[in-house]
Image (tube, rainbow, N blue to C red):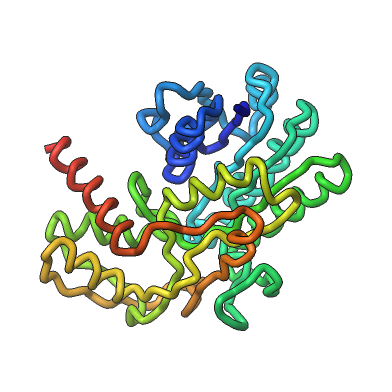
Amino acid sequence: MMKVLITGGAGFIGSHITEELLLQHHQVAVVDNLSSGKRSQVPLEADFYEEDIRKRGLDNIFSDFQPDCVIHLAAQVSVSKSLQAPFKDGEENILATINVLQCCVKHHVKKLIFSSTAALYGSPKYLPIDEQHGVKPISFYGLSKKIAESYIKMFSDIHGLTYTILRYANVYGMKQDANGEAGVVSTFIERLLTNQPLHIFGDGTQTRDFIFVKDVAKANVAALTKGENEIMNISTEKQTSILDIVNELKAITYSDISPVFDHERQGDIKSSCLSNKKAAHVLKWKPVYSLTNGLKETIGFYQKEMIASS
């Protein structure tokens, strides 16, 4: 059993990681300022601290909980918002990470696991993208994550802090905010269930690597004991177009709603797919959910939410 502190643990991915850690009998504390996360998403078995990780109060939380490991998820996660408000993006993704790192060193944390992103790679030179691919982000979000990674590596070099960096493909699933990188899935489900048109940016042939949140949670737990000072993609290694997502969702919900096509968005890339071979080898991890099964579970969750709130 380890004592694990999760920043952003009341959010979409963080709450699933919290649940998986508790299933594996770890002691868990969540720190979240609830700007996008929800207190109701934190399991009762986890300790909860409401705090902004950019602030000095974070040091007191480390002192109180004394974590063995830290899983750092708290971040600004929207590409479009990063382009509109780069200062806020830099504060939440770079300065906050520095504060977490300083607390890790001061309180002798054994390991930091960092949630990074496929957005670092920018426009792919080849597919699937492996970890040797060049890093050339085309959004401030990708850039801020790249700089955060560099700080982590330097803290490791200077202070001996062990880390694992996980670069996520497009994560989708239950409890997702529509503003995230893969928010298209939760947005489409919400609109389908309320009989509203689906808006697609561009022609819908653009592809992404959609990975189910429960698979991502298992990768984080695997990284507690494996992958020292490694960077790994967490992905399905499959390309799925936005139109494929629409057709899958329509088939599952028996909907006949046709999509509406809008202009392409700035900062969006045409195709993305990440190799997961390194994670399979180093973490002994592989995704177990197919797209259909992940979407079915996600739709079921939102249907129950709608019934509960009606």
- Would you place residue 213 above or below residue 5 in this image? below
Residue 97 visible somewhere in the drawing: yes
Q: Position of residue 60 (x, y in %)?
A: 67, 20
Check the image and name the residue furthest to the top: 64
| Place of residue 35 in the rendered image (x, y in percent of width and height, measured from the top left) | 45, 37
Q: Position of residue 254 (x, y in %)?
A: 11, 65
Which residue: 31% across, 55% down?
186
Let me know if residue 141 appears in the view: no
Task: Give the position of the N terminus as an image quadrant.
Answer: top right
Picture coordinates of residue 229, whole percent (x, y): 75, 51
Which residue is located at x 56 percent, y 42 percent? 221
Answer above or below: position of 80 versus 58: below
Which quadrant of the view contains residue 120?
bottom right
Q: Tell me where residue 261 sits by quadrant.
A: bottom left
Count all numbered tags in the image, as a single digit.
0
Q: Residue at x 16, y 35 (%)?
A: 308
Relative height, residue 101 to residue 273 (above, below):
above
Q: Nearer the viewer, residue 234 or 53?
A: 234
- When the figure is inspected, residue 239 is found, relative to residue 50, above or below; the finding is below
Residue 34: quadrant of the picture = top left
Q: Nearer the viewer, residue 171 or 146?
A: 171
Q: Is residue 182 left or right of residue 50?
A: left
Farthest residue to the right: give it.
158
Quadrant (top left, top right, bottom left, bottom right) of the C terminus: top left
Residue at 23%, 72% (x, y): give it.
247
